[in-house]
Image: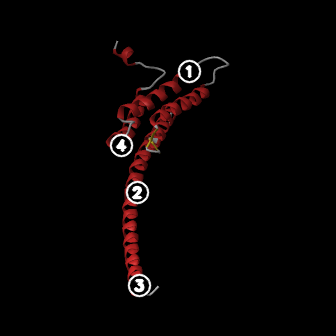
Amino acid sequence: MMDQLLFISPYNWADIGTAILCGTLIGIERQVRNKPVGIRTSSLIVLGTYLFVVSASFLDGEALDPSRVVGQVITGIGFLGAGVMLTKDGAVVGVTSAASIWVLAALGVMIAMGHTLVAIKVAVLVVLLLWGVDVLEDYMVTISRWMRSKLSRRRLLAGSKRSRRRFRGDD
């Protein structure tokens, strides 16, 4: 009885767990930063993609091509990602979240193709990339502010020297 409840062929509990793990890893990073695609959404994207691709691999018939399902998943995920992007004060926001959605779907495809360990490694790499680039951007903003303050101080000094020259008649 219990065996029948847990039997989910052609799907695999380990693959489902991997899909949820990969989605959770990336989703935690997104949720901690208050981004639109959090833990639940990320996990569902990876899991849903996995389910579609595995389901397609068990379709029968000459006219059926499982690789077309992957293409359709990519198209559908593109629309989902486009819905996350917005224009705010003339700037496009949400592009990184949209790109994350695409990577999440790619992870689902990888898991469906049997590359579970690689999918976990890629998920960790994505988290490091999202976090690392954010740290680098913060560092660059700090350097940029420091440079602007130096330049504005120099401009102020240069402006005061010019005004002293004019006052003395050195022009």
Do the numbered discs 4 and 1 sit on residues whose CB atoms are within 8 Å? no
Residue 164: horizontal and vertical position, in percent? 38, 83
Q: Residues within 10 Å of mark 1 (few under 14, many from 20)?
A: few
Q: Which residue is mark 2?
A: 136
Lower position in the chain sequence, tag 4 or tag 2? 4
> Which sits earlier in the primary sequence, circle 4 or circle 1?
4
Indicate which disc, 3 or 2, sits on the residue closer to the N terminus.
Answer: 2
Say which residue label 1 marks: 58
Disc 4 + disc 2, Cβ < 8 Å: no
Quadrant of image for the N terminus: top left
Specify whether 55 is left or right of 26: right
Amino acid type of the residue tagged 1 in the rendering: Phe
Residue reaching furthest to the right: 62
Q: For the residue marked with disc 4, what is the amino acid?
A: Glu
Residue drawn at (56%, 23%), measured in percent from left and top?
56
Disc 4 and disc 1: Cα gap in Å?
Answer: 34 Å
Mark 3 lies on residue? 165
**152 up-or-down from 9: above or below:** below
- Closer to the chain start, of discs 1 and 3, is 1
Q: How far across and down, in percent of the image, does residue 12 sit? A: 44, 26
Q: Amino acid at mark 3?
A: Arg
Residue 35 bears which disc, if any? Answer: none
Marks 4 and 3, how far apart in space? 57 Å
Amino acid, disc 2: Leu
- SS at mark 2 in the image: helix
The residue most toward the top is 1
Q: Earlier in the sequence, mark 4 or mark 3?
A: 4
